[in-house]
Image (cartoon, helix red, strand yellow):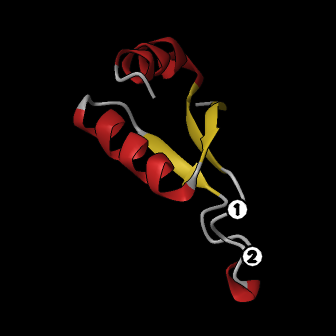
Amino acid sequence: MSLVELGRYDRNLANIIVGRLDAEGIDAIAFDGGASIADGSYLLIPVRVMVDGDDLAAAQTIVDAAQI
């Protein structure tokens, strides 16, 4: 299993994407969601959505179909 970056999104959208992918049977994880929460800039830091390299094409198709 090799994680690759699907994309970078704002914190809320990243979590929505992870949930959508999970509903389609694709494991995904949001990285950096808690970055800089102490200084209040957590909404400004993009969150990386990571998927298995083998699932990248399918995940990208799902994200593209949702017009995100």
Q: Residue at x 35, y 23 (%)?
A: 66
Residue 29 rendering spot, x and y as whole percentages: 50, 48
Residue located at (49% from left, 18% from top): 60
Q: Camera-side residue: 62 or 3? A: 62
Tally the marks. 2
* In the image, residue 49 above or below residue 26: below
Q: Quadrant of residue 33?
A: bottom right
Q: Secondary structure at mark 1?
A: loop
* The N terminus, quarter of image: top right
The residue carrying mark 1 is 44
Query: Residue 23's image quarter?
Result: top left
Name the element at disc 2: loop
Type of amino acid at the residue the image marks with label 1? Leu
Q: Is residue 61 above or below residue 47?
A: above
Q: CA distance from mark 2 to mark 1?
A: 9 Å
Could you tell which of marks 2 and 1 lies nearer the N-terminus?
Answer: 2
Res 3 → quadrant: top right
Residue 10 shown left or right of residue 20 in the figure = right
User: Residue furthest toward the bottom?
Assistant: 38
Which residue is found at the position 54% from the left and 57% from the top? Answer: 11
The answer to whether 25 appears left or right of 63 in the picture is: left
Residue 25 location, x and y as percent? 27, 30
Q: Is residue 29 left or right of residue 45?
A: left
Query: Is residue 38 shown above or below 28?
Result: below
How far from the left and from the top, in percent, is residue 46?
68, 52
Mark whose residue sits in front, 2 or 1: 1
Can you give x and y, in whole percent of width and height, for residue 28 in the image?
Answer: 46, 41
* Residue on which disc 2 sits: 36
Near mark 2 (Cα within 10 A), the count class, few <14, some 14-19 or many ≥20, is: few
* Amino acid type shown at disc 2: Ser
